[in-house]
Image (cartoon, helix red, strand yellow):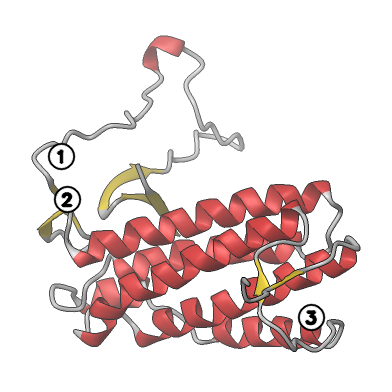
Amino acid sequence: MSFFVTKYTGLHRVFRLGTYVSIKQMQPASGHERRYASTSEENRRIPKIYTKTGDKGFSSTFTGERRPKEDHIFEALGTTDELSSTIGLAREFCIDSGHSFTDQLEKIQCILQDVGSNIATPRSSARDSHIKKTMFSSQAVMELERWIDSFTEELPPLTNFILPSGGKSSAALHVARAVCRRAERSVAPAVRSGETDPEVAKYLNRLSDYLFTVARYAAVKEGKGETIYKRPE
């Protein structure tokens, strides 16, 4: 079950593989106190995690269009969610190892939420208001490039093919890199058809380079050797 959350003024939208549930923020109580929940457990309204709207194999995009769940839009959404999950797991290993770039990984996970929102808004059925809310900025790509350049300056030149290795942090980041490549491939059909912003594909392409670079950086900082590819005898 995949979720992409975007926050707008007075409204939270929770994307569940393309479908969304709107949860209105509670209005301030009279006076100076802002009340977010009833003091009575009986009156508290908790939205259910299940919607039952996808039980027949169809789901909705942000634009309200119903599509089969095997549609390339939902395939791209699911793979992007998987990517964020693998980065989250890698980040936990990196936190345990005391790495300095964990805040970057968290920010990337947040940006992947924006990637999901853009994918969930196919241009073929989107209105201008949809496009405006889910527009993806090229600034995120440039930020990745700055981070890559900074880490590369501290790494030895790459002269051989390396195998995913270098400790738990590094290996987990390599797994995330491989999933990122798959996410990029899953988004490609939507970009070619004009349904998804090309900047999304560019971001995923650059993100895989970042994950490769930061995986090597993690191995170096932990003093772990990288496993060099050797042609089997």
Q: Which residue is mark 2?
A: 59
Total marks shown come to 3
Q: Amino acid at mark 2?
A: Ser
**Residue 192 position within the rendered picture, expressed as x and y whole percent measured from the top left:** 24, 86
* Nearer to me, 214 or 202: 214
Give the Cα separation between the discs numbered 2 and 1: 7 Å
Q: Are marks 3 and 2 in contact (CB under 8 Å)?
A: no
Q: Which residue is mark 3?
A: 151
Disc 2 is placed on an element classified as strand
Q: Quadrant of the N terminus?
A: top left
State the residue at coordinates (84%, 66%).
225
Q: Amino acid at mark 3?
A: Phe
Neighbour tally class for label 1: few under 14, some 14-19, many 20 plus, Cα within 10 Å: few
Q: Are marks 3 and 1 in contact (CB under 8 Å)?
A: no
Q: Which residue is mark 1?
A: 53
Find the residue positioned furthest to the front.
Answer: 233
Q: Viewed as shown, does residue 157 lie left or right of 136?
A: right
Neighbour tally class for label 3: few under 14, some 14-19, many 20 plus, Cα within 10 Å: some
